[in-house]
Amino acid sequence: MTFPALLVLEDGTVCKGLGFGHSTVSVGEIVFNTSMSGYQEIITDPSYAKQIIAFTHPHIGNTGTNNEDNESDGIFASGVVIRDLPKHYSNWRATSSLEEFLASKKTIGIANIDTRQLTGTLRDHGSFKACILPDSEDAIAIAHDALDGFNGLQGLDLAKEVSVKEKYSWEEGTWPDYKDVSDGILIVAVDFGVKKNILRLLKKHVGEVIVVNAQISFDELMALKPDGVFLSNGPGDPEPCDYAIELIQELLHINMPVFGICLGHQLLALSGGCKTYKMKFGHHGANHPVQDVDSKTVFITSQNHGFAVEESSLPENIKTTHLSLFDQSLQGIEFTDKPAFGFQGHPEASPGPHELEELFIKFKSLIQSNAKKN
């Protein structure tokens, strides 16, 4: 069921639209995503906690949703903004409409928004706080109250809020057959907001996977006897995550092989003495060119982050491995004296290109090389 709705930005902009999904008042930081497909994976990515996703592609919802493509069991995003809400959906895997899917996850969406103009505003001025809510006589006042109560993402530790509560073993390989491929290596994946396809690729390329809470202690983690530790993606500002930074520093001290993606990459960098910063509007999409600085090979990557590592802050024992060709921001790091590396983008490609799946193979090789040294 649809309903009249408003999108209100912190600069005073008010956009009238068609609400769908769950009728509620929701506030967050609004960001634009340039992906042309994979909207279900994007919406269910925990890294979007406290964010409203504005899709630049006008056809969002036309293939419906299904039971296989969720990157988490819920929706942590604050809302969805699209141009056109399709009356019908069609795909052989579809089980429900986007409207039904959002309603089932208690998430609000708004359609009939000029997303081209909105994207231009966000590109020029940076990400805004925004509110989506049902239209009413006092809706604008309600929206401004909600905006005043939201302080933005900077300084906000969201990883511990979206992390799994109890540890579990991940048993699923990659689509379509979900084949289990492993050879005795044990990976402990620290969940800061992990996506399911990352776990699938760890299972496919590396070994057994145990997923643990973001605030696990060093002793608790080591009691699991891991061969390597994976640091997942996740939402929010990395700098307040002291518990994670301290854990990673202890892992580095004992030369534990470590691989970090997105927030995990930022936390790894902070653990090595680097600095991070909030970007103007971040990277959100599946068409971002990233270059390997040694080979000069260019990869098209999937991205979703609003914070980045400051390259000028890298100490002598951390080298740059990848750079964004959009804005030259840091995309990859590697320790020269520790078996640890990180990548800012999403090599698990969900959604997006599969060109950097090789990083999971690199992680396995790093583990095997470290085992031989010891």
Image (cartoon, rainbow, N blue to C red):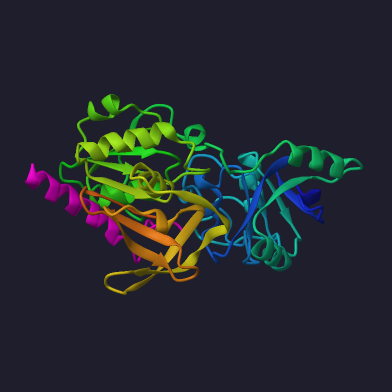
99 relative position to 316: left or right: right
Measured as percent of width and height from the top left, residue 276 is found at 47, 49
Measured as percent of width and height from the top left, residue 158 is found at 52, 37
- The answer to whether residue 368 is magenta is yes
Q: Which residue sits at x=45%, y=34%?
A: 163
Q: Is residue 351 above or below residue 44?
A: below
Q: Which residue sits at x=78%, y=50%?
A: 8
Q: How many tags in the picture?
A: 0
Measured as percent of width and height from the top left, residue 18 is found at 78, 54
Q: Nearer the viewer, residue 53 or 312?
A: 312
Q: Is residue 165 above or below residue 310?
A: above
Quadrant including the C terminus: top left
Residue 62 location, quadrant: bottom right
- The answer to whether residue 358 is magenta is yes
Q: Is residue 291 above or below residue 16?
A: below
Measured as percent of width and height from the top left, residue 101 is found at 61, 46
Which stretch is magenta?
345-374
Q: Which residue sits at x=35%, y=33%?
A: 246
Q: Is residue 370 above or below residue 353?
A: above
Asked whether the viewer can see residue 23, the reply is no
Q: Which residue sits at x=66%, y=50%?
A: 99
Q: Nearer the viewer, residue 341 or 118?
A: 341
Residue 316 location, quadrant: bottom left
328 relative position to 246: left or right: right
Asked whether the viewer can see residue 75, the reply is yes
166 relative position to 256: left or right: right
67 relative position to 342: left or right: right
